[in-house]
Amino acid sequence: MQQPADQPKPDPATTVAGPYPRLPRPVVDLVPPVLILLLLVPLAAADPDVGPTGSPAVNAALMAGGALALAARRRAPLAVTAVTLLSGQLPLAVALYGLAARRGPTRALAVLGVLAGLRLTIPFDLGDLTTLSTLATVVEDPLVFGAVPLVLGLAAHQRARAVTVLAERNRLLEEARRYGEERAAAAERARLAREMHDVVSNRVSLITLHAGACSHAAADDPVTVGETLELIRGLGLQALTELRGLLGVLTPASEDAPSLSGLPALVGESRQAGLAVTLTVAGAGEGVPEPGPAVQYAAYRIVQEALTNVHKHAPASTATVTVEVRPDGLRVAVVNTGGTSAEGPGLPSGGHGLDGMRARAGDLGGTLEAGPTPGGGFAVRAGLPLAAIAGAAA
């Protein structure tokens, strides 16, 4: 993939090399046995001091048996370590390291470690330990071929466990990141769908109503036809402007986004479309802050969608829009009197308007209730906080 022009190219002098190539596992398993067979077995056959007994032939045989057993140390570390207790020091050291690295600090490792210490100490004469050189000679084999392999094996085991834990943690973090991205993408798709529904449903519904009125206008009344066409043009331009905002040129929190100050114009559009609607806006009192931009934007969209539903289902009714800023939040109510009916002016309904309004209010930490009124009408009432809750979608 081609590198972006604004991204600096890595400096070869400072680039960290990747992991070194590793030998295949069968090769790693066979290296210690082969080296012991080629080097230590001939040495044990020639020197009686190399091995646990005084016989060179027996020492060579035990060394060879321990070397061959090491080939299976990965599959049966316990058995191999037990076998190498009768072999030479180096096969025992390799087996102890493998057992500690694979099994960790177990009871079996402790028992075999003690037996290995005894095995590496018994060949020496323990009667004369008065000199420092004699003591060092006795301690040397148990330390070099017993304690050091055990410590290194346990360290390798702990490192492997740490690597496994970190790998699992990274996997869980990656899954959490991917899940968060998927949730964010789904939330963004839902938000865009809600915005598109509000913009298209309201504007296109009004355009449809005005186009229907224009088609029934008298042919000899060009003034009415012209005014109606101008209204349709204005509604289309408003729809294009809001759709442009949804594509990222504008944002809901920008100064050009719809807010409470745009409610009179919104209500005026409904009046021009033939709906009897009144608007009452009670501003913030002394000491009460104005609602935030995101809250005003949500309130505007809720009123817009509620009026669109009135146009669709009860075009002959009277609607009342009430917006009140209180110390405990913003209250929005859109109530239409008269019967609601599905027999509107032929406007389609997706059936998602109320769900969208509830989701819009819930995103800000508010609530929305909608349902029939005792007088046969329909009411939409929302309560929004003056400021959006942390993390709420705009």
Image (cartoon, helix red, strand yellow):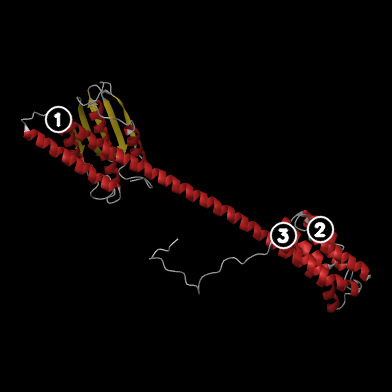
> Residue at the location (55% across, 54% down)?
170
Under mark 1, the amino acid is: Ser
Q: Earlier in the sequence, mark 2 or mark 3?
A: 2
Query: On the image, numbered disc 2 is attached to which residue?
Result: 80
Query: Is label 1 in a helix, a strand or a loop?
Result: helix
Q: Quadrant of residue 286?
A: top left
Q: Earlier in the sequence, mark 1 or mark 2?
A: 2
Q: Quadrant of residue 323?
A: top left
**Residue at mark 1 to residue at mark 2: CA–CA distance:** 97 Å
Q: Report whether residue 74 is seen.
A: yes
User: In the figure, 32 relative to 288: above or below?
Assistant: below
Which of discs 1 and 2 lies nearer the camera? The answer is 1
Residue 248 at x, y = what percent?
Answer: 30, 50
Query: On the image, numbered disc 3 is attached to which residue?
Result: 101
Left/right of residue 14 with respect to residue 201 in the rendered view: right
Which quarter of the rendered picture does the N terminus lie within? bottom left
Give the class, few, some or many, for how many residues have Cα within 10 Å of label 3's Cα (few <14, many ≥20).
many
Q: Are marks 1 and 2 in contact (CB under 8 Å)?
A: no
Query: On the image, numbered disc 1 is attached to which residue?
Result: 215
Left/right of residue 391 with respect to residue 20 in the rendered view: left
Give the class, few, some or many, for how many residues have Cα within 10 Å of label 1's Cα (few <14, many ≥20).
few
